[in-house]
Amino acid sequence: MEEEKKTSTLGSLWNLMDRFSGDKVIFLIALFLMLISVISVFSSTPLLARELGSDRMSIMVDQLKAVALGFGIIFLIYFFGKVEWYRRLSMLGFVVSFGILVILVFNLNLGIVKAGSINGARRILTVAGKQIHVYEFVKVFMIMYLGWALDTYKNHSFRWANLLADKIPHLAFLGKDFWQKAVYIYLPILITTFMVMMGSNSSAIFIGGIMILMILVGGISGKEIGITIALLLTGVVVMFGAYKAGVLKESRIGTAISRITQDDDATMNILLTAPRGSRQWNDARDELKQPVGALLAIKEGGLLGKGIGNSTQKYAVPVIFGDYMFSFIVEETGIWGAALIILLYFSLLARGTMVAKECDKYYDKMIVTGLILLVTGQAFMHMAVNVHLPLVPQTGQTLPLVSHGTNALLVFSIVFGILLSISKDARENMARREAEAAPIIEHEDDNWTQDTTA
């Protein structure tokens, strides 16, 4: 009886997956990453548990709740989301991003909504007592916005720009091709990047880079993208000058300068030569604790790893459950665990590219492309930081759907919900083309029937 019930349950799950019309590969990748996150968060958070006055089991339960909520969001968007709704909401992406960044940059208190900071960096809003990590949402809002802007530019349908160009002679330039791109694409990229830079250099680098990469894939000319990058660099220089003049002392520019100019070898020399316990020794240890601890975790993981729950660096690296989750996974599971994580994200990139190719509408293609670049780009940047890849800045990007953090997990759940929702149409196109495709070897129907009958 129990066996029949078990078979019935498995059969129901199989039938549910069989009726699932979204891209099954993308769904399974999200599922595996979320399951990995539950195990990894439980094992990697002893320091966090001590800091919160809690225990790892409670943290794991919270992570399970977040994962369950994430799956709920994925299925809700998958079943009820419409591309037309995404497009309309995408129009507001830059306006919403600009609004919440203004609250953050100017440290505004609007009653129910007020700016907050973590470790001295302004990057959260408190909404009715709940913390919202602003940059997690801004990067998705801007990807959606750029998808709309690129599609609208391609169709020459910037309504307000065309209307103003027709009605007001002095604004006739808004009807020209370059100015429409400047107003609707380049300017939002520049404004968003500079505003994010006020609170987080790493997020500014990542968000700006993903936006530039997206418009490059979207067909914007390399020359104009070069001009945009030049303007970004000019803005950075101006902000640096303002910081030196004392105008932007509260920004994170000082942190960026210290990271760029930091000499790890010199810091290591201080750690080795200064008296143990002295101020110099403590400062050097704190500077090297995270990057060196992450590298040590990877080295000690080796080929097979130490085994689940046997990490030692989780007691030394303060945020190994977030910014250095990849190092932690390698320490416990070795090269095989690292290979699995890399394979999942590479598979997502490959599958997302295939889905984008099969989309009929340009907007759908750009949204899928942008969101896939966002997830995989953040994953590979996280890994590059963990292995201390040369020329890669020490940024604080989490491993998507794996690192601890409810805000990030829920945002990426929204991303996967949108991807799966759009993939429904793409899968229909794939199935139709497969049905229409001619066989590799042609057979005469009569002869084939005779041969098989005989």
Image (tube, rainbow, N blue to C red):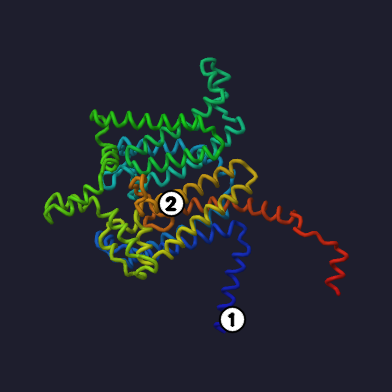
Tell which tag, 2 or 1, sits nearer the viewer.
Answer: 2
Return the residue nearer the eye: 223 or 255: 223
Q: Is residue 407 visible?
A: no
Residue 398 % position (x, y):
38, 52
In what element is the residue under mark 2?
Answer: helix
Question: Looking at the image, is mark 2 or mark 1 earlier in the sequence?
Answer: 1
The residue under the point 47% across, 47% down is 374
Task: Please tell me which residue is depicted at 49% across the width and 28% down the height of the picture.
Answer: 183
Q: Is residue 130 left or right of residue 410?
A: left
Q: For the residue labelled by badge 1, is the local secondary structure a helix, a strand or a loop?
A: helix
Q: For this view, does 282 lie left or right of residue 9?
A: left
Instruction: Return the mark for residue 4.
Output: 1
Q: Is residue 353 or residue 172 the one in the foreground?
A: 353
> Residue 98 appears at what percent x and percent y?
41, 36
Q: Which mark, by number, is residue 380?
A: 2
Residue type for callout 1: Glu
What is the quadrant of residue 328 in the picture?
A: bottom left
In percent of the image, x 33 and y 66: which residue is there? 58
Spot occupied by residue 254 in the image (x, y as percentages of width and height): 26, 38
**Amino acid type, callout 2:** Phe
Of residues 128 and 354, the one drawn nearer to the viewer in this rendering: 354
